[in-house]
Each structure stands twice: as C-alpha cells, then as structure tokens.
Image (cartoon, rainbow, N blue to C red):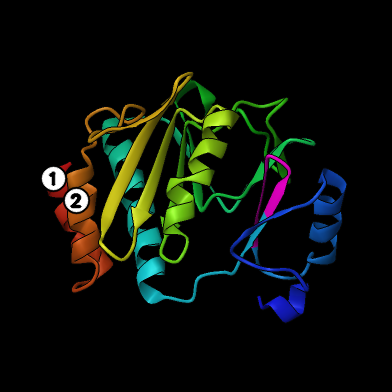
Amino acid sequence: MSEAQTHLPVNTWIPVSWQEYLQTLAELLNVEEKHYYYKGHMRLEMPPFFSDHAQDYMTIIFGISLFTTLKGIPATGLDHTTFRKPKLEDCQPDVAYYFQKHVQSVPSGTKIVNLNRYPAPDLVIEIAKSSLLDDLGTKRSLYEDLGVPEYWVVDVQNTQIIPYVMGDKGSKRVHESKVLPGLAMGILEQALRRSRETSQSAIGADLFSYL
C-alpha cells in the first residue's frame, strides 16, 4: 500500500474521529493493510515485504503450535484478526491466541471480535521490523488497555522476543511465558536464529527435542 493509494500517511498515528476512521477502512476495503485506532488516533501500516519477517512469523506460530500440542494445552490462534472496542480502540495484531477455557470464546465466522462482548486474547504477538518502536510503545499501551494478559514483540532485526505481562498497573518484561508456563523465550529465539540458515522442518526437529 502506498500513500498515493490511501491519500493518508502510513506508519504513523494521525488524529481522526471514530467515524472518520471507519470511513477510511470502508474506502480501503480491497487494500491490504493493517489498521489501529487508539486515543483518537489512527495508524495504517504497509504490509511487510521481507522474507525474514515472514520466516519469523511462521517460526513463532509453529513453535507455539508444537508446544501447546505436546503439553496438551487447548489453543486457538487467529492471524490478522480485528479486535475492537467500538468508538474507542481497534487493532489487527499479527497473531493472537486464546488458551484453555477461552479457546472457543469467539464463534466461527466472526468478522470483527467485539471486545465488549468477547474476552480479549490471552496472547498477542507483533512481528516487528520497521514498526519496532511503535510496537514497544503505543501498541503496548493499546493492548494493556484492551486487557490482553500477555504481549510479545518479535524483533526481526535482532532475532529477539520481547515479552510483556500486562496488569492493572501496566506491563513488565518477563523471560518465560505466564500464559504458556514452561515456554522459555530463549528456545524460540534460538529457533528464530536457526531459521536464517536451515529449513523449517529442521527447526521443528530442534524444537521437538527442546520442548
């Protein structure tokens, strides 16, 4: 997506009303883009065009799927799904997960997850390259306000995962997942590094032995 296509700045927060935001989304219906709304500001993001971004995206999903399968943890993953508190907040994280008792919280076929009706995801993940500072800053505050218990930022440039546990008093960094007990970030970070030099099947074999 280019600025010429949208006539609006991308990868930055701009002040708009909720109705202006919805009108913009209606005009961009057939354009691939991510969109966010927070504190009276809208952000549109260009889709990533980097292979390392795509590799990390697949590796993280594969790692979580393998871990939850081996540990018998009920899990439902959603990618590029819109989560919304009407008139207040809107987001499209790269990946979101519901675990345990929440796995069937959102009915099949739901286009937009209304967080006034359904619970927030247990885990939200953003795969960050050009958007890293925003993912660590404003978006983290957005997910705090939405009531997301845990938030990971995957730093593509440095093959690093920056996880936060959310609470009433803000968020704090952790080294091991709280919503997926026993899953150390170091294991997934090693898989991210390995993805730069080997196949996903080889990474799977490594993860299987570690998990």
Q: Quadrant of residue 105?
A: top right
Question: Does residue 77 show up?
Answer: no
Q: Which residue is mark 1?
A: 210
Q: Which residue is mark 2?
A: 207
| Residue 44 x, y percent position in the rendering | 65, 61
Q: How many marks?
A: 2
Vertical comparison of 48 with 37: above or below: below
| Residue 158 x, y percent position in the rendering | 25, 62
Which quadrant, please, contains the C terminus? top left
Asked if the residue at tag 1 contacts the one at tag 2, i.e. Cβ–Cβ closer than 8 Å, the answer is yes
Q: Residue at x 47, y 45 (%)?
A: 137
| Residue 11 x, y percent position in the rendering | 59, 64
Is 135 in the magenta? no
Residue 177 shown left or right of residue 14 in the figure: left
In the displayed orientation, state which residue is furthest to the left.
Answer: 209
Vertical comparison of 126 with 97: above or below: below
> Label 2 crowding class (10 Å Cα cut-off): few <14, some 14-19, many 20+?
some
Residue 200 shown left or right of residue 164 in the figure: left
Q: What is the magenta range?
A: 34-42
Q: Residue at x 24, y 64 (%)?
A: 201
Vertical comparison of 75 with 17: above or below: above
Q: Looking at the picture, tell me which residue is in the foreground, 185 or 24.
A: 24
Q: Looking at the picture, tell me which residue is in the foreground, 54 or 205.
A: 54
| Residue 61 x, y percent position in the rendering | 39, 52
Q: Residue at x 41, y 64 (%)?
A: 129
Is 37 in the magenta? yes
